Image (cartoon, coloured by chain):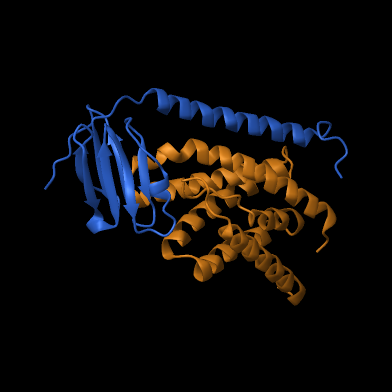
Chain colours: A orange, B blue
Amino acid sequence: MDVKKMTRLALIISVAMILSYVESLIPAFVAIPGIKIGLSNIATVFALYTLGVPSAIAVSLIRVFLSSLLFGTAASLIYSLAGAVCALGVMILFKKIGAFSEIGVSVIGAVMHNVGQVAAAAALMRASAIYYYIAPLLLAGILAGIAVGVASGILIKRLHV
Amino acid sequence: MQKKIFGDKKHVADIALIALLVIVVLSVFAFTWFSAEQGARVRVNVEGEPVREYSLDVDGEYSLNGGTNILVIENGEAYIKEANCPRQLCVKQGKISRSGESIVCLENRVSVTVVGPQDDILEVK
């Protein structure tokens, strides 16, 4: 990998981490754990559309590991990783299908991110209790996905890396 | 910025996707909500394992998981009164009373779920 590409990726990952950190400062005003806008997905979607699949995977996974290392706990790493992997897989698939814009890809990514987190939490806590949270969590995820998708779209058009 | 939002075929597909997802989520929610009945007991799970059950008919205050969360049962409803977790999401969750409803404390890995009369009664060791 050449230095230019590596630097570019590092820059995008740094931005993703900052977005993730800024988001963590917003108080969770809803009592459901895991409700968040997923701002750092802007970086992932951006990377997916401007640099390609391997870069997007790198941005997403490295960001998850570094953020959890610096700001989170072992538990948060597992939930984050589960969400990120699910989201990545589906987003790459949907982009390949080609029928949706970055907004649709972002929405399905946000939804699958929450699904992944809920599945991890349910597996860890073995509470079918968790399924009670799914509905509001997913609705919030859809809204967040739209917002993130729109923001990413603007960046993809305007920002040339 | 974008020319015509609705002229672009991909945006139409996006909207269809979003509508479909919303419908799926709402139907799942409606299904679980309407199949819930007045529960009879709450089950406390710690780290994924059921630990104890308490009857919703009997008022009381209970210390869970060695004191990390305090459960209160009052007038057929249950809620977490106090907890030592940093974000206090379980305390803010409010009261539960219908079967399937639950309060979860992710940090302490404690969950309290309302189980219905026909669910298996927990054998406490």
Apparent side of residue B2 relative to residue B118 in the rendered image (left or right): right
Q: Residue at x 46, y 25 (%)?
A: B30
Residue at left 46%, top 46%? Answer: A31
Q: How many marks?
A: 0
The quarter holding residue A55 reads: bottom right
Q: Quadrant of the N terminus of chain A?
A: bottom right
Residue depicted at 59% across the width and 52% down the height: A88
Q: Position of residue A33 (x, y in %)?
A: 46, 49
Foreground residue, B1 or B66? B66
Horizontally, is B48 left or right of A23 in the view?
A: left
**Which one is nearer the viewer's eye here, B103 or A116?**
B103
Residue farthest bottom in this picture: A3
Q: Is residue A53 left or right of residue B89?
A: right
Nearer the observer, B109 or B6 = B109
- Tell which of B16 and B27 is nearer to you: B27
Residue found at the far left of this picture: B125
Image location of residue B120, percent across then percent down: 20, 33
Give the image location of residue A24, x and y in percent.
56, 59
Q: Is residue B55 left or right of residue B21?
A: left
Q: Tell me if I can see residue A58 in this picture.
A: no
Residue A135 vs A127, above or below: the answer is: above
Q: Residue B31's x, y, as percent?
A: 43, 25
Answer whether residue A14 is visible to the viewer in this image.
yes
- Toward which corner of the image does residue A140 lie, by quadrant? top right
Q: Quadrant of the C terminus of chain A?
A: bottom right
